[in-house]
Structure formats: structure tokens, C-alpha cells
Image (tube, rainbow, N blue to C red):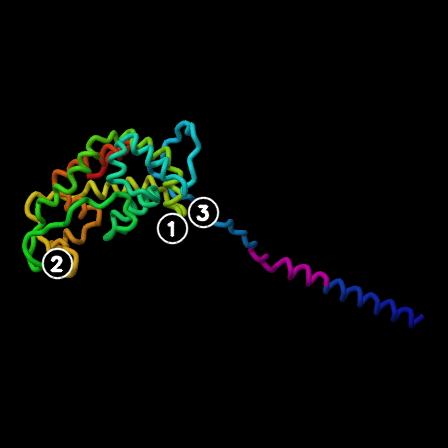
């Protein structure tokens, strides 16, 4: 009898101890603040750069575009319809026309242009300067070298030229992206370059030159530091440059509704 009572007491004590342990565990766990849940961060959205001057989406061309490697005949034919066969033979490079155009346009605001990539043949005749290597001036007869080409450009209908550009635009865009601008938009770059060229200063007086090496450079450091496209317009002479600028304004209006920067 005494043994049974002892067993019962021990069992009761064990139950109490176990119960207290369970109570302590539950309440101490509840008292601890729960660790804040870590919200899963969404992956950053890769937004496409905003296009400032989108090419209008017109009717699909009646004939499909050729691939870039076979585009020269079609581009030459389209330009010849505007400027004439003689102008194409005299001034337009015979191969890789679109690639040359894209590379040259992209380089015009820079300090140098890749001569071997230019889309237009060099002006006939030799560059002429008056004076010596220490002090020279640009001979005004150089301006005449550009006059036949400028006369041809003066007659161009820039709306029609822009229509040719729009027709072949997918090829221009593809070349531009392959130059290292996978998210770039070539028409925006074209408008930027036109604005740079329109900002070329008009110089009516003598233009001083120096010849530190083989090539002549502008003696005025502020002129020599200008973009390659602006230096080319200056070298063409003020009258020729004025014609080119006027046609650029027309072209800009044809590819964008924004007003040109002055």
C-alpha cells in the first residue's frame, strides 16, 4: 500500500514537472519577437531608352528590303532617282553605303572621321594654303572644289530623301546597334548630329592654319577643338556651308517634328 502511494506521488511529480516544462517552452517562445520576414526583392526592370524621334511607321514597302550585304544596288538606285545617275557615280561610294553612312554620321561630332569609311568621294583637286608651315591661311580657291557637290545637294528634295531613308531605316538601325549601341536609336543620333552641324560658326575672314606635321590644322585652338563635321563645313567656305545647313534644316524637319537647335 505504501509502495503504491509512493509510485502515485512520483508519477504526479513527473506530470507536474513535464507540464511546467511545456508551459515554460511555449511561453518563452511566444515572448520572443518573430524574425521579420525578408521580402523578396523583384529583379530590376531593364527599361529601354526613351526614343526621342521615332521613325513613322508607314505602309509596308511594296518590295521587301534586301539584306544589308545586298543593299547597295537598291540604295544606289533610290538615290539616283533623286539626284541622277551622274551624281551617284561622281559622289556616292560604290559599296557598303549604309554602313559607311552610319559610321560617318556617328563620327561627325567627334574629333576625327574614319576616311576609309566615308560614304562620299573626296572632293577633286588638292588642298591649297597660302604661306608656309609656320603661318598659312586657307586659300579661298579650296571652296570651289566643293561647289559642284553643293550645287547637286541644293537641288535635292529633302522630303523625298527622307522617304528613302525611312524605307531603308531597319538597315540603318541594325548597323547602328552593331556598332556598339545595342539599345541605341539611329534616328535620334542623326538628329543630334544635325544639331551639332547647325551649330558650326560662320567664318567670313581669312582662316589661319599651321602645319605641325603632314596635315594642316587650324591655328585657332578653339576651331581645331571643334567636332570634325564642323571643321569640314568651315573648310568648305561660308557660302557652301550655308547651303548645307539649309538642307540639314529641311532634313531634320522631315525626320522629326522638333525645331532645330541653334
Residue 169 left/right relative to 26: left
Q: Which residues are magenta?
A: 22-36
Which dot, 2 or 1, sits closer to the camera? 2
- Whether 56 is among the magenta residues is no
Residue 48: % across, % down:
42, 43
Residue at the (41%, 27%) spot, across then down? 59
**Residue placed under numbered mark 3 in the picture:** 46
177 vs 43, nearest the viewer: 177
51 vs 169, nearest the viewer: 169
**Residue placed under numbered mark 2 in the picture:** 211
Which dot, 3 or 2, sits closer to the camera? 2
**Residue placed under numbered mark 1 in the picture:** 180
Residue at the (84%, 68%) spot, across then down? 9
Residue 197: % across, % down:
21, 42
Mark earlier in primary sequence (3, 2): 3
Q: Quadrant of residue 166?
A: top left
Mark earlier in primary sequence (2, 1): 1
Residue 41 left/right relative to 242: right
How would you rate the neighbour count of disc 2 (Cα within 10 Å): few for under 14, some for 14-19, many for 20 or more? Answer: some
Q: Quadrant of residue 23?
A: bottom right
Dominant secondary structure of the magenta stretch?
A: helix
Disc 1 secondary structure class: loop
Disc 3 secondary structure class: loop
- Whether 28 is among the magenta residues is yes
How would you rate the neighbour count of disc 3 (Cα within 10 Å): few for under 14, some for 14-19, many for 20 or more? Answer: few
Residue 87 left/right relative to 183: left
Amino acid at each position: 500500500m505504501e509502495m503504491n502511494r509512493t509510485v502515485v506521488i512520483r508519477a504526479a511529480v513527473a506530470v507536474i514537472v513535464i507540464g511546467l516544462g511545456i508551459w515554460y517552452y511555449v511561453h518563452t517562445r511566444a515572448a520572443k519577437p518573430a524574425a521579420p520576414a525578408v521580402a523578396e526583392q523583384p529583379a530590376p526592370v531593364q527599361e529601354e531608352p526613351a526614343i526621342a524621334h521615332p521613325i513613322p511607321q508607314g505602309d509596308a514597302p511594296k518590295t521587301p528590303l534586301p539584306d544589308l550585304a545586298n543593299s547597295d544596288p537598291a540604295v544606289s538606285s533610290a538615290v539616283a532617282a533623286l539626284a541622277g545617275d551622274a551624281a551617284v557615280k561622281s559622289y556616292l561610294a560604290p559599296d557598303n553605303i549604309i554602313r559607311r553612312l552610319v559610321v560617318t554620321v556617328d563620327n561627325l561630332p567627334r574629333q576625327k572621321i574614319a576616311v576609309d569609311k566615308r560614304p562620299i568621294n573626296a572632293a577633286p583637286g588638292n588642298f591649297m594654303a597660302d604661306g608656309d608651315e609656320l603661318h598659312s591661311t586657307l586659300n579661298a580657291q579650296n571652296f570651289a572644289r566643293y561647289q559642284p557637290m553643293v550645287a547637286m545637294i541644293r537641288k535635292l528634295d529633302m522630303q523625298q530623301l527622307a522617304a528613302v531613308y525611312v524605307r531603308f531605316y531597319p538597315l540603318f538601325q541594325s548597323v547602328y546597334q552593331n556598332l556598339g549601341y545595342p539599345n541605341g536609336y539611329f534616328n535620334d543620333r542623326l538628329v543630334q548630329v544635325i544639331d551639332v552641324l547647325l551649330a558650326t560658326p560662320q567664318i567670313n575672314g581669312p582662316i589661319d592654319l599651321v602645319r605641325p606635321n603632314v596635315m594642316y590644322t587650324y591655328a585657332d585652338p578653339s576651331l581645331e577643338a571643334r567636332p570634325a563635321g564642323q571643321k569640314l563645313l568651315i573648310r568648305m567656305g561660308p557660302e557652301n556651308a550655308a547651303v548645307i545647313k539649309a538642307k540639314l534644316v529641311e532634313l531634320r524637319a522631315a525626320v522629326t517634328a522638333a525645331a532645330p537647335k541653334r
